[in-house]
Amino acid sequence: MNCIIVFLKEDPKMKIKNTDKLRYAFRAIVFKEMGDHFRNKRMLILFGIILLTCIGSLYTAISGLKNATPAEETESSFFFLKLFTLSDGTLPAYFVFISFLGPLLGIGLGFDTINSEQNKGTLSRMLAQPIPRDYVLNAKFTAALLVIAILFFSLSFLVIGAGLIALSIPPTAEEFMRIMCFTFVSVIYVALWLNLSVYFSVCFRQPTTAALAGIAVWLFFTVFAPLLINLILKTLEPSPYAPPYSQYAFQQFQFAIIQLIPNELYSQATSTLLMPTIRNLGPLTIEQIQGAIPGPLPLGQSILIVWPQLTGMIAVTMACFILSYLRFMRKEIRSR
Amino acid sequence: MSDHHLSIKTGLLFLIILLGSLAETPAKTLELYTPFTKISVPPGETVNYPIDIINHDSITRNCTIYVSGLSSKWEYSLRADGWNINEVAVLPGEKKTITLQVVVPFEINKGNYNFRIIAGNLTVMPLSINVSQKGTLRTEFTSDQVNMQGHTASTFTFRTQLKNFTGEKQSFALSSVVPQGWSVIFKPNYQQATSVEIEPNQSKEISIEVKPPHTIKAGKYTIPVSASTGSTSALLNLEVDITGNYSIELTTPTGLLSSSIIAGKQKKIDLTIRNSGSTDLHDIQVNSSKPQGWEVSFEPDSIPIIPAGEAMTIVATVKAYEKAIPGDYTIGFNAQTPETKSNISYRLSVKTSLLWGWLGIIILLGTTGGIIFLFRKYGRR
């Protein structure tokens, strides 16, 4: 952080407008933070884990695809997208891995954002500089988000490249757009967990506490929330002889309650984006199915299907950011 | 006295010369022989005469041999050892056998027919054939009903009789000369066939199936059918009266059978009903088969008449079920008259309304607005 302070002090062009100077300062903090992330051993370990799972899933997908190639039509069935969704059972598919490991990455990037600086005493020194207070939080968040985006987009391009080598079939424009959308959704999903852990890092003075709190939430949503929801659903389940409308209402309730889990939102959104044949996520009535013929949806319609999930994820991410922002702005920061 | 003597002398001389000339006559040197010189046969029969040529002379006799007295309608041939014979040579004291084959024509009157076999200028053998009855080549090909009426899709089945009046069993080839697209099938014994055998003076029922081409215009058409052998043939003209076909074609003006629709919204689809048949279509009804919850109405939903070859456009208004899921649905459109019908399946790709999408965007704008508000409040730029 010292170098930032020096940099800010020794700004040579005194005539530069205030807003330009501030933007310059913001950019400087972002780049510095990104540099910290890339040099950090903890981050390298997390990146390594994600890269390994990506390669593993890609390997199983390609070996599965090679068996599936002769039977299936390549053009119509969105062959390339199967790289992300296909699994032969030994390893989960790529997007399932991300729904599981993405939170860990987000928590790992964010749990010591504020509190470690506070503990080292650098936060008060930084805030002594002529920059707005929220720039510290905003820049740290932006830096982490950029790192996540770089990581995920490079992983996606890695998969596309490996797929091109292994299958020698180029993705169609729509497939490419779907992959980009999937990557974007993954970035948002990890940003959600990043914001949550940033919030914890503002709340708790000890980084370990913040990390544990983040991991606790993650574990709750991956392990305990499904159990809890199952418990609730078991008690509410209507008898098989119940009238259809109550069965339908129960199915809708089940669909709604499952969506409280962010992992579920993510996997619904990504599976719909990566599998164009998915036409609906919730329960269906006979009237809706009648006359429907199976076929892939255009990308716009797929996005419309998962629009509630996407909106929910983005809104929750923003809400977490607002919380941590408020908390940070009202925080009393004293030098040690 | 001397005059008298002279006359006796000259008379004797004449007698000697006469006797001498008799001894030299060729009838005695070559003889023709066949056992049956008069044969009675029906018309159309083939008669084989074995003919012996006997040489009574002491030298080899060579002479031409031919038949005379048979009209050109008769067929005959002289054969020996597989050859056609025109001249024959016989060694002294030997005989040679040749065969005369005579074919009695079918068309011939009853009576005696004489002819001769002539061996050069050496000998003649008269022969006689008695034709036992009046022969004819007549074959009759008739039908009780030679005119039939129907539309283009129908099959015209004519029941005809083929009678063989000739004296022989005949094998008739059945054929017809029709323009391209027509199909004529002969069924002599309920089996499709191209030829039929009929005993003399017998008749056979032959059913003839005529199928007109699909695209033929209404009108009268003559189908000549014939039964023929090498020697005789009979022609029958069948008449087919086509009343015109009924054909309706339902499509869209562009031919495109797919479109998109927003769930819960209406969509107007133009439909073209074309009369592709050769007669006017009356009372055309249009209806649809649709998934539950969908509504389809037509404007108009019935058309009183479409002349042959003309087309009409109607408008179908489709309202998608408001809870339809995005993706493809099929709707069947059906146009029918009492005579014919046509249906198409139309593919509608349902898109969901953007209403809930806008709600999501408003939520996002709200949160973004909150963040901007916080920036303003706490930012202290």
Image (spheres, rainbow, N blue to C red):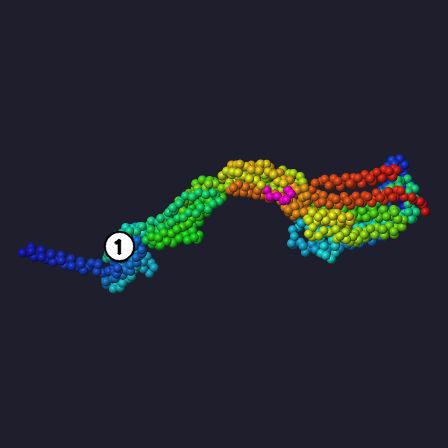
Tag count in the figure?
1
Can residue A139 be seen at all in this image of the molecule?
A: no
The percent coordinates of residue B209 (x first, y second) are 44, 48
Pick out the residue farthest to the left.
B1
Residue drawn 83% across the image and 52% down it: A216
Can residue B293 be seen at all in this image of the molecule?
A: yes
Q: In the drawing, does residue B231 fall left or right of residue B117?
A: right
The image quarter in which residue B35 lies: bottom left
Question: Of B43 and B144, which appears nearest the observer?
Answer: B144
Q: In the drawing, does residue B68 fall left or right of residue B292?
A: left
Q: In the drawing, does residue B59 fall left or right of residue A216?
A: left
The percent coordinates of residue B177 (x first, y second) are 42, 46
The percent coordinates of residue A254 (x first, y second) are 74, 49
What predominant SS class does the magenta segment belong to? Answer: loop
The span shown in magenta is B288-294
Q: Is residue B118 above or below residue B294?
A: below
Q: Residues within 10 Å of mark 1 (few under 14, many from 20)?
A: some
Q: Is residue B360 magenta?
A: no
Pick out the residue farthest to the right.
A336
The percent coordinates of residue A81 (x first, y second) are 71, 50
Residue drawn 27% across the image and 63% down it: B95
Question: Of B214 and B286, which appears nearest the observer?
Answer: B286
Amino acid on which the number 1 mark rests in the picture: Asn
Residue drawn 65% across the image and 46% down it: A287
Question: Of A276 and A256, which appears nearest the observer?
Answer: A256
Indicate the secondary structure of the residue bearing disc 1: strand
Task: Provide the chain ID for the residue under circle 1.
Answer: B
Q: Is residue B293 magenta?
A: yes
Pick out the residue farthest to the bottom.
B93
The image quarter in which residue B369 lies: top right
Tag 1 residue: B130
Q: Is residue A329 above or below residue A82?
A: above
